[in-house]
Amino acid sequence: MAPPRSASRGFTLIELLVAISILSMLALLSWRSLDGMTRTHALTQQRADGLLRLQAALGQWGADLDAVVETGEVNALDFNGQVLRITRRDSSESGLQSPGIRVVAWARHTGVPSTDPASNAATSANSGQWVRWQSPPLVRRDELARAWQRAADWGGNARLASPSSPGGGNDSAVVLFGIDQWQLFYHRGETWVNPQSSVGTEGTSGTPSAAAVSELPNGVRLVLTLTDGQTLSGQLVRDWVRPNLQAGRP
């Protein structure tokens, strides 16, 4: 006689509910972990992009100063407390040909949309942005005079920060990053001074020399106060030294 077969036993409803609950909790924990990793990656990418944008802007700042050229028509560097104007060689200039010189301007503008995705709309609307402007290559004296004036007008008018600004023609402007304020200092003599100060330009008679005032300083110190609420914040100091400065010379 064959032994009796044991009846097969399935899962009860309670056991199924417990298993489903456990699987749901595991799925929720996995989703939170993946969401946290995604957010961390996005934040890291934003910070990396902000750092690259800052490095590119400061690299352009140094390149503009390195390429300064004196024309004899206007000051190679001119800062009025609001906008810095520079006459510089074109970046494509070589020993065989030159498309001309460019007028470059740096200023802080308000009401300009931020390029930093980490800053919110309210912060962007109320804070200032560091902006760089440049003219097309110039080959004539009258072109230089007009571009020099356009740079001054642009520096005092936020509405002209657009590349399609009236009268600008092929002028262009690039919004860099948010700043609350910026300061410049020139190194003349043996100290850092306000660019509009005559300290360090005294001649043998002890009075300021007009020629010395128009000469390139030994160095330029840039002090930026970065806007809070964006990828990077705080104060940033960048020094530039004139490439042809000789040791022991004023």
Image (spheres, rainbow, N blue to C red):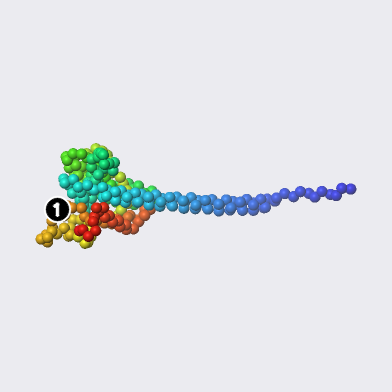
Residue under pointer 1 = 211
Farthest top residue in view: 169
Q: Position of residue 181 (x, y in %)?
A: 28, 55
Q: Position of residue 13 (x, y in %)?
A: 68, 50
Give the residue at x 43% y 50%. Answer: 45
Q: Position of residue 137 (x, y in %)?
A: 24, 40
Give the residue at x 80% y 50%. Answer: 6
Frontmost residue, 139 versus 250: 250
- Whether residue 148 is visible to the viewer of this picture, yes or no, is yes
Q: How many marks?
A: 1
Amino acid under label 1? Ala
Frontmost residue, 111 versus 41: 41
Q: Position of residue 117 (x, y in %)?
A: 38, 48
| Horizontal side, residue 154 vs residue 209: left or right | right
Give the residue at x 46% y 53%. Answer: 40
| Horizontal side, residue 230 vs residue 38: left or right | left
Frontmost residue, 172 versus 89: 89
Give the residue at x 61% y 53%. Answer: 22
Work out whether 250 lies above or below 112: below
The 10 Å Cα crowd at callout 1, few under 14, some 14 to 19, many 20 or more, is few
Position of the C terminus, as image quadrant, is bottom left
**Secondary structure of the residue carrying numbered label 1:** helix
| Horizontal side, residue 133 vs residue 45: left or right | left
